[in-house]
């Protein structure tokens, strides 16, 4: 049943009231989605990411083995059915990825999601992952600005546009053999918008298994406003960050953090090697963190103090293959021209 706007607002206000005063900082309705980082190592050093801008302050590198993952899973004592297997690193740098995916499926997980940069990933590993997840719900997305050499090389790695295309063509072949589709995630900037009516259809014709392209603006990471598209894209009023309604993320080190953007390890509330997940979700540190946000005192959380994510107006559109195949030139021009409105927001 679809919820009306008023009902949703009432429900949100009730949740805020509960978290503020009735059960301070406590998450009472647990979601069914977990985010688990398999590694925080990456093969790229993108300019939109702490790995590229502030590597020295990132958490020490960790990659979780399948044996450790088995122990970690035994510490997760809440029901969950969906898992995101990525956070700050490249999941295909973890050679146990297929074993871990298989373990999660055996555990009863019905939906897995893996985001990769697609850059020189191990094709055999991808094949193994597709084999173990055959017949199950696996969503794979590759982050790459394939529509523009200049954008890709500015964001990801100079001089490597041909290489990412070679990697993506190999990936597309494998996906075709396994009759699977995938998504491409790409950051857009204003200069590239006028090229999209030509470059996006071209991308779909070159990559036959590509199902959709997710185009979005870069967001500013905590302490690193330069990573995001922020000029004119900030709301004047600080909103309540949606992270507090979600389950804390699980890092490759086995630690549990309150924020998905915690590249420094600033808001870790404990470790799964010492506590069960249910003990960490609502321990004192977790409740204090949420309460600070819901009382609009987020600055008391060091990671939130200068974070712009909750004030940031982001841009995001999903372009489907079905739409591109049906659309004529005029419709494509009109559709992509609308993207300019985001970039022409008046600075506040
Ligand atoms: S944005 Fe993604 S691919 Fe790029 S360095 Fe960060 S984690 Fe790696
Ligand atoms: S305000 Fe920023 S740092 Fe704080 S929880 Fe939200 S996204 Fe994370």
Image (spheres, helix red, strand yellow):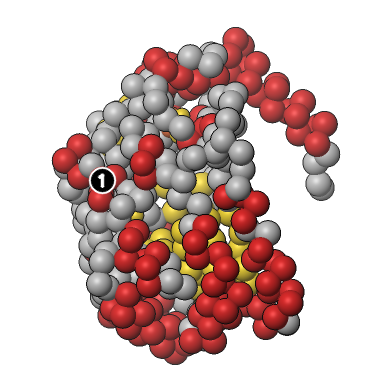
Taking depth in this image into account, of 201 and 189 the one nearest to the observer is: 189
Whole-percent x, y for residue 33 in the image: 51, 47
Quadrant of the rendered structure where residue 272 is?
A: top left
- Judging from the image, what secondary structure is the residue with disc 1 in? helix
- Rendered residue at 34%/70% (across/down): 118
The answer to whether the beta carbon of the residue marked 1 is less than 8 Å from any atom of ligand 1 is no
For disc 1, the neighbor class at 10 Å (few under 14, some 14 to 19, many from 20) is some
Whole-percent x, y for residue 315 in the image: 58, 50
Quadrant of the rendered structure where residue 151 is?
A: bottom left
Taking depth in this image into account, of 347 and 65 the one nearest to the observer is: 347
Whole-percent x, y for residue 123 in the image: 29, 79
Q: Which residue is mark 1?
A: 53
Tell which residue pokes out farthest to the top in this image.
21
- Rendered residue at 44%/53% (across/down): 84
Q: Quadrant of ligand 2?
A: top left
- Rendered residue at 48%/36% (across/down): 309
Q: Is residue 208 left or right of residue 171?
A: right
Question: Against 186, is 27 above or below?
Answer: above
Whole-percent x, y for residue 10 in the image: 77, 26
Q: Is residue 323 left or right of residue 241?
A: right
Can residue 291 be seen in this snapshot?
A: no
């Amino acid at each position: 049943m679809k919820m009306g706007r008023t009902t949703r607002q009432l429900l949100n206000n009730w949740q805020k009231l509960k978290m503020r005063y009735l059960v301070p900082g406590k998450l009472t309705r647990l979601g069914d989605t977990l985010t688990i980082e398999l590694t925080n190592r990456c093969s790229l050093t993108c300019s939109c990411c702490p790995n590229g801008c502030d590597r020295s302050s990132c958490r020490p590198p960790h990659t979780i083995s399948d044996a450790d993952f088995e122990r970690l899973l035994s510490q997760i004592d809440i029901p969950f059915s969906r898992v995101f297997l990525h956070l700050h690193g490249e999941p295909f740098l973890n050679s146990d990825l297929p074993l871990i995916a298989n373990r999660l499926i055996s555990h009863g997980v019905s939906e897995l999601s893996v985001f990769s940069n697609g850059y020189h990933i191990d094709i055999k590993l991808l094949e193994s992952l597709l084999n173990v997840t055959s017949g199950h719900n696996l969503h794979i997305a590759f982050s790459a600005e394939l529509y523009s050499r200049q954008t890709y090389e500015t964001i990801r790695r100079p001089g490597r546009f041909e290489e990412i295309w070679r990697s993506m063509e190999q990936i597309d072949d494998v996906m075709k053999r396994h009759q699977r589709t995938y998504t491409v995630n790409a950051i857009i900037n204003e200069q590239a918008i006028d090229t999209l009516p030509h470059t996006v259809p071209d991308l779909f014709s070159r990559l036959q298994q590509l199902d959709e392209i997710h185009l979005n603006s870069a967001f500013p990471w905590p302490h690193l406003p330069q990573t995001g598209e922020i000029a004119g894209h900030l709301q004047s009023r600080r909103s309540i960050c949606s992270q507090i309604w979600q389950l804390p993320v699980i890092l490759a080190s086995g630690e549990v953090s309150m924020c998905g953007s915690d590249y420094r390890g600033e808001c870790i509330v404990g470790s799964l090697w010492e506590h069960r997940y249910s003990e960490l979700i609502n321990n004192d540190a977790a409740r204090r963190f949420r309460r600070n946000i819901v009382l609009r005192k987020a600055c008391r959380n060091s990671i939130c103090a200068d974070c712009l994510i909750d004030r940031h107006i982001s841009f995001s559109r999903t372009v489907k293959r079905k739409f591109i195949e049906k659309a004529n030139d005029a419709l494509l021009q009109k559709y992509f021209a609308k993207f300019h409105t985001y970039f022409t927001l008046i600075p506040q």
